[in-house]
């Protein structure tokens, strides 16, 4: 029996909704994306995910305690005959590797029970140093044949060879077994620091997939520019060598 429990705070009709997860990864891409969606779309907390194997921590925001893994949702948005509803799962910690599959199964069981039709999972992966001025790439991979067109819809490159680990990898595998539509959006990150620029590329891709919802990544790009200037200032004071190795491991 799974130790992962999902406690619903409020009940919403989520039939046809899209579940987007945001777990800490390289560059905190998934975490930044999840929090951006929660704040931009003004989503409300609808549940928490808990387990005796999770760290015993409380996240304090505005003087209130919050579970470190939470579910948020908003109302369905319709535009030009297309409707979208977003559910976001955000985590303040990286789940222990030994419970990743249990967590993914609990999430997919809950999504199926509530009528969610697809899952989007965002990850960062370390690509090593890049040429100055060159944009970060973003890749897509799906769990089912029927969801392959999403890669083109999202205007991302297909990820055809490599290893996808962590939550995204487990979601893709379980999605294939269950014939449930999962798309992994894999954003290139050249350093393991919070990377709002990489997160912005994921937001652009999600914006292409959710036609009824307008997402503007400009605030993230502005944040990225400010962070990059701060990092550059630190480097000029204390230069350090940067590894030239390129990793294809994601997760």
Image (cartoon, rainbow, N blue to C red):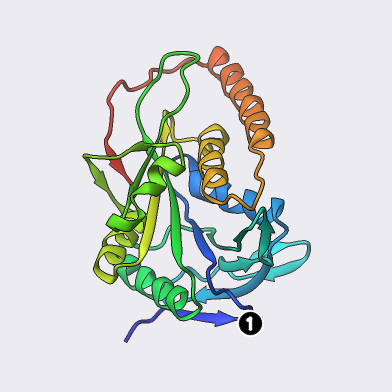
Mark 1: give few (<14), some (14-19) or many (20+) Cα within 10 Å: few
In this picture, residue 194 sits left or right of residue 183: right
* Furthest-bottom residue in this view: 1
Task: Determine which residue is flagged by label 1.
Answer: 11
Residue 188 to residue 35: above or below: above
- The percent position of residue 98, horizontal first and vertical second, equals 29, 66
- Which residue lies at the image location 47% right of the left edge and 23% below the top edge? 135
Residue 72 to residue 40: above or below: below
Mark 1 falls on what kind of element?
Answer: loop
- The percent position of residue 181, horizontal first and vertical second, equals 37, 62
- Where residue 190 sits, quadrant-wise, is top left
Q: Tell me if residue 59 can be seen.
A: yes
- Which residue lies at the image location 34% right of the left edge and 65% below the top edge? 100
In this picture, residue 167 sits left or right of residue 61: left
* Furthest-left residue in this view: 161
- The percent position of residue 1, horizontal first and vertical second, equals 31, 87
């Amino acid at each position: 029996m799974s130790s992962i429990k999902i406690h619903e705070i409020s009940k919403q009709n989520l039939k046809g909704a899209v579940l987007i997860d945001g777990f800490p990864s390289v560059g905190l891409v998934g975490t930044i994306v999840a929090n951006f969606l929660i704040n931009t779309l003004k989503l409300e907390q609808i549940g928490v995910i808990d387990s005796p194997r999770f760290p015993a921590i409380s996240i304090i925001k505005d003087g209130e305690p919050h579970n470190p893994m939470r579910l948020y949702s908003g109302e369905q948005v319709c535009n030009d005959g297309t409707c979208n509803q977003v559910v976001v799962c955000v985590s303040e910690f990286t789940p222990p590797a030994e419970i990743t599959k249990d967590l993914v199964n609990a999430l997919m069981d809950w999504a199926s029970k509530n009528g969610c039709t697809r899952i989007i999972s965002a990850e960062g992966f370390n690509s090593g140093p890049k040429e100055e001025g060159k944009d970060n790439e973003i890749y897509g991979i799906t769990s089912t044949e029927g969801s392959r067109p999403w890669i083109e819809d999202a205007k991302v490159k297909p990820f055809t060879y490599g290893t996808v680990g962590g939550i995204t990898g487990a979601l893709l595998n379980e999605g294939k077994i269950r014939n449930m539509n999962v798309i992994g959006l894999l954003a290139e990150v050249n350093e393991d620091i919070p990377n709002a620029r990489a997160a912005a590329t994921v937001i652009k891709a999600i914006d292409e997939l959710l036609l009824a919802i307008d997402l503007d990544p400009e605030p993230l790009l502005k944040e990225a520019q400010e962070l990059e200037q701060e990092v550059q200032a630190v480097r000029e004071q204390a230069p350090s060598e940067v590894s030239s190795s390129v990793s294809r491991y994601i997760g």
